[in-house]
């Protein structure tokens, strides 16, 4: 299935930012948190979830909380509390974690307790005692966690699937995973049409999570084509949301993922060009638009963007002219040169007057 079609336009580019849509999970993450040297400072009330787990909400979510055996998709960062050493960051890796509540790894028990208290779209800070983390021994491989290390987690619950049997992605057939991703994509499309961009992005990100690199690497032939027919539109729709939210760098990233699989994808070229233009990367934006025009020469939106870039270049040129003019000032006008015959005439007249004056003076004497 293709990504959402533009309204009031049949072109690849026009109103291309207006496309995307969820299901019974909730809300998505907004601007990703900044990667600082340590855990964020949070002033909200501390909630005790367990004698070894406390919680502070950074951003509210909405909807229901996941139940046991829900398959949860989340981003998180993790630090050892004593050393402030960050040992995990899924935002940086751009790979959400899949966590099945009740079937999590032993070292993630405390994290699972925290996630089970969250609503979709919620972001929170958790303090977890070492007993519910990496234990007395810690971990000396990956991740590297000291012995008896209390942990701090910054977590965002993207969303979750309710499954009684707790079926993880790895246990699904190819058809089941593609089908689950496609349902998420359709839900995202519905939300986008309602201009619920954050919620729509949640659904697209969860759909993409079903088809991670490890999964795509195993596919070939018709199954790979089926997966890309869902995955690429999700990336394109994510880019459309991100452009609307003025998160241009992220939009460029999603378009580039599509172009790595389909180098002639006009939508991806157009949207990446738009995002680059907004960032002032005019040469790169023009390159994207020109390539898009090669495959869609009649597209009015592409022509419009190229025209806007040309007008912008002209405006910048005129502005630079004014700046340079102000710095160096106007060129001085040359002084008119006196002709040689005029000088000669004046010299002759002065000589004549002097001679007459001397003659009259002699007569007087």
Image: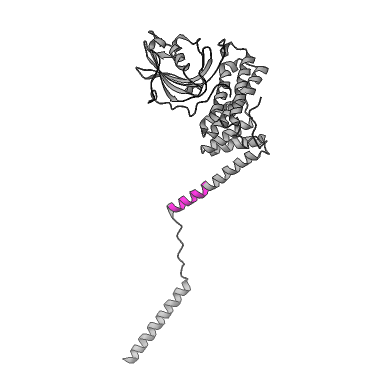
Most common SS among magenta residues:
helix
Is residue 175 shown above or below 205? above
The quadrant holding residue 48 is top left
Query: Which residue occupies the foreground of this view, 331 or 261?
Result: 261
Q: Dividing the image into 4 quarters, which one contains the N terminus?
A: top right
| In magenta stretch: residue 287 | no
Query: Which residue occupies the foreground of this view, 265 or 152?
Result: 152
Q: Seen from this angle, which residue lies furthest left?
A: 365
Q: Residue 191: x, y in percent?
A: 58, 28
Is residue 134 shown above or below 313? above
Q: Residue 328: x, y in percent?
A: 43, 53
Q: Residue 36: x, y in percent?
A: 40, 26
Residue 260 in view: no
Q: Seen from this angle, which residue lies furthest top?
A: 137
How many numbered tags mark residues here?
Answer: 0
Q: Which residues are magenta?
A: 316-326
Residue 358 in view: yes
Q: Dividing the image into 4 quarters, which one contains the C terminus?
A: bottom left
At 60% from the left edge and 34% from the top edge, which residue is drawn?
18
């Amino acid at each position: 299935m293709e990504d959402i079609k533009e309204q009031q336009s049949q072109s690849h580019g026009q109103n291309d930012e207006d496309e995307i849509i969820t299901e019974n999970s909730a809300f998505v993450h907004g601007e990703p948190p900044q990667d600082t040297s340590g855990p964020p400072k949070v002033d909200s009330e501390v909630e005790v979830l367990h004698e070894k787990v406390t919680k502070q909400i950074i951003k509210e979510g909405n909807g229901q909380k996941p139940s046991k055996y829900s398959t949860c998709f989340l981003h998180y960062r993790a630090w050892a509390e004593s050393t402030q050493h960050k040992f995990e960051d899924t935002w940086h890796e751009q790979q959400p974690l899949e966590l099945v509540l009740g079937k999590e790894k032993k070292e993630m028990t405390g994290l699972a307790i925290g996630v089970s208290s969250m609503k979709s779209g919620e972001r929170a800070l958790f303090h977890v005692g070492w007993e519910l983390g990496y234990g007395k021994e810690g971990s000396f491989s990956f991740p590297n966690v000291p012995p008896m290390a209390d942990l701090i987690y910054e977590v965002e619950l993207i969303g979750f699937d309710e499954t009684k049997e707790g079926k993880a992605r790895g246990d699904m057939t190819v058809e089941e995973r593609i089908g689950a991703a496609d349902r998420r994509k359709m839900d995202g499309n519905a939300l986008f049409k309602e201009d619920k961009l954050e919620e729509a992005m949640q659904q697209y990100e969860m759909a993409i999570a079903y088809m991670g690199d490890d999964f795509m690497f195993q596919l070939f032939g018709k199954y790979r084509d089926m997966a890309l027919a869902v995955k690429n539109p999700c990336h394109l729709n994510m880019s459309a949301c991100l452009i609307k939210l003025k998160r241009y760098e992220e939009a460029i990233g999603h378009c580039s993922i599509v172009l790595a699989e389909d180098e002639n994808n006009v939508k991806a070229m157009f949207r990446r060009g738009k995002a680059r233009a907004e960032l002032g990367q005019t040469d790169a934006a023009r390159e994207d638009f020109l390539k898009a025009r090669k495959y869609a020469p009649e597209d009015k939106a592409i022509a419009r963007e190229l025209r806007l870039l040309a007008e912008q270049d002209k405006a910048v040129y005129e502005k630079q002219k004014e700046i340079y003019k102000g710095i160096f000032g106007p060129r001085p006008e040359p002084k008119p040169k006196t002709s040689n015959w005029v000088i000669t005439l004046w010299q002759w007249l002065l000589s004549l007057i002097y001679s007459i004056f001397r003659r009259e003076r002699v007569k007087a004497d």
